[in-house]
Amino acid sequence: LGAARRVASLGAARRVGERRATRSGGVKERTKAKRSTALPISLSAALRPLRSRVRRSLRPPGSARRVSTPPKRLQAPHSKPSLQSAGLGRVDREPDPEPRGSSAPDCGLASDRQIRRVDERRASVRTANFSAIMLAAWTAALLAARVGAETTDEWHARMGSLFEQEFEAVKDGKITYMAVAVSDPKYGDQAWWFGGYDGRAATREDHFGIGSISKSFGATVALQLAEEGVLDLEQTVGHYLGDQFPAYDNYTLKECLGMRTRIPDAFNVKDSFVKTMFEDPSARASLETIIEDALADPLLPPLGDSAAYSTTNYLTLELLVEHVTGRPMRDLVAEYALEPLGLSETSLPPRDSSGKLAEPASRPYAGPSCVEELEEVGADGVDTGWTLDEIFPVLVVTSTGGGMESTIDDLLKWAKSGAGDAILSPETVAERHEFHTMGFPRKYGLGLEGFPHTRFDPRLNVPGAWYGHSGDSFGFATGAWKSDDYDASFAVVVNTCSFLMFTIRIQQLYQQDLEARLTTPAPTATTPAPAAATSPAPAGGASSAPTGGASSAAPTTPRGGSDAASSRGPTLVAALVAAAVLLLSATAVTGTTAW
């Protein structure tokens, strides 16, 4: 349009000049009119201002302006100046001043200096717009990242609320104490504890029996002795103990560690040491007596390629290790496991000791499932709600078969070590993790339990195999697990026996949170934290004053939450879309070159 207006203006001016020249009849006037009002030589010359403005609009802000000077035309000596030399049709420099007395009208063309001023102002505006839009885009991106994030305190409170809800649902008449600890790939080591006993709130330092997790300690000792050449896992029990236990003569140490024998479990034999210790809790049976009582029962059916759980195998291994080394298993566990891993609150009491837990101590409690199992082996007279303060210490005679004690923090350390894998050679660890099925979905290695996942349904195809060990003793159910897939560890305890499925439910809640954080942001809290309440005193005199516990780095009042997928997902997507739109707007407003 500018070029068209320029052409039209020049044409009108030329016609006016010619008319004036005709009227005056002077050659001088006609020459002056032609010189001042002549049209551009070509359409290209007429469009030159438009091309110049387009180039300036595409020039990045602050860049130097390139000025091209067209070559001068050759002229004959003493020839008249051409239209180009007169400055007509040129846009790269300011036109020559009009001759005095010229009647040509002003065509309205801007000078180079004016164009530069406009370009500078436009460049300043573009730069300011670009800076403002980029600032807004980065702010939106940061807000979007914050929407999907969850602080350690927030996560600790949300998970604590989930655990507390499960605890509140089952505590009355069943359990009075629960502690949970995790080593999380993002939030580090965290712990929670709930409930209490005798009017005293539970603490993080409470000691409890770890039951069959003790077997993983005994296995770790035996495997290290094998690495040192003291034991040969391929040798039979009879090779070391002679004919003391003929039923074991043909079973190797490796088969005993992997529960690959047909020897009955001493705890499942009716009218055995379990019934005796309930009748006289002060009695302390020897390992030999317990093993012989178990061997009096018929052997288990052929195993094939599977495994069969039997505590008797580990009682026999303990006798064998002490016979070969000449040292008590208590000292070996301390040297080969507790000291290397810094488990200062974990111990294996002597088999002839009182068996009482170190202070502060949790109180063992008899839940309904526990009472049923005791009745099956002839230990009558125990009712739901009874405390097992007198009966639990008898387990000290089982030693690495189920007599150790620990705290929730030490149990988490043991879980993080892979139940002892951290102090074994890679070759031994690989051999230890050769699992055999022991009732779906449970598998057993060498002193190591394994689960494909905690959902108990292979159709879900949930990633994350856990390995470690569980424990079920007179008054406590425990678990210590590790997942290499999630780089996470988990430890849990409740103060009642035969309650392992509940501990697995707690583990499921944690795994669901891990799964959600692999693909979506952590869920927000949707349920308020349940108010602290006092449990009714269970039968037998045990009372509970539950108070939710928290690690020192986290708040003590849990915040409610849901284990479902997070509602923050749509908000995060919307924020990211907004950031993308702002960035695209920056491209559109400032131009491709500036972007």
Image: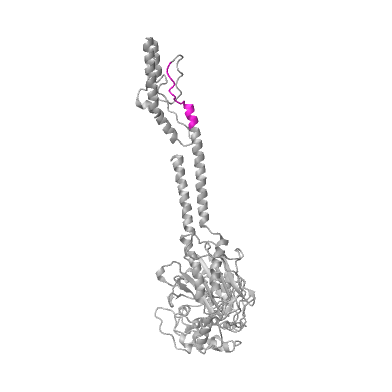
Examine the rendering and report whether any part of residue 83 can be seen. no
**Stretch in magenta:** 103-118
Foreground pick, 212 / 82:
82
Whole-percent x, y for residue 361 in the image: 62, 76
**Rendered position, 134 above or below 400:** above
**Rendered position, 7 above or below 61:** above
Q: Residue at x 50, y 68 (%)?
A: 509
Is residue 585 shown left or right of residue 180? Answer: left
Is residue 587 shown left or right of residue 322? Answer: left
Foreground pick, 192 / 232:
192
Total marks drawn?
0
Whole-percent x, y for residue 554 in the image: 60, 63
Whole-percent x, y for residue 268 in the image: 49, 85
Residue ranking furthest to the left:
42
Whole-percent x, y for residue 58 in the image: 43, 36
Is residue 584 shown left or right of residue 540? Answer: left
Image quarter of the N terminus: top left
**Rendered position, 75 above or below 271:** above
Q: Quadrant of residue 7?
A: top left
Q: Quadrant of residue 31?
A: top left
Picture colour scheme = one colour
Examine the rendering and report whether any part of residue 372 can be seen. yes
Q: Residue at x 42, y 21 (%)?
A: 87
Foreground pick, 198 / 294:
198
Magenta-span inclusion, residue 292:
no
Q: Residue at x 51, y 76 (%)?
A: 500
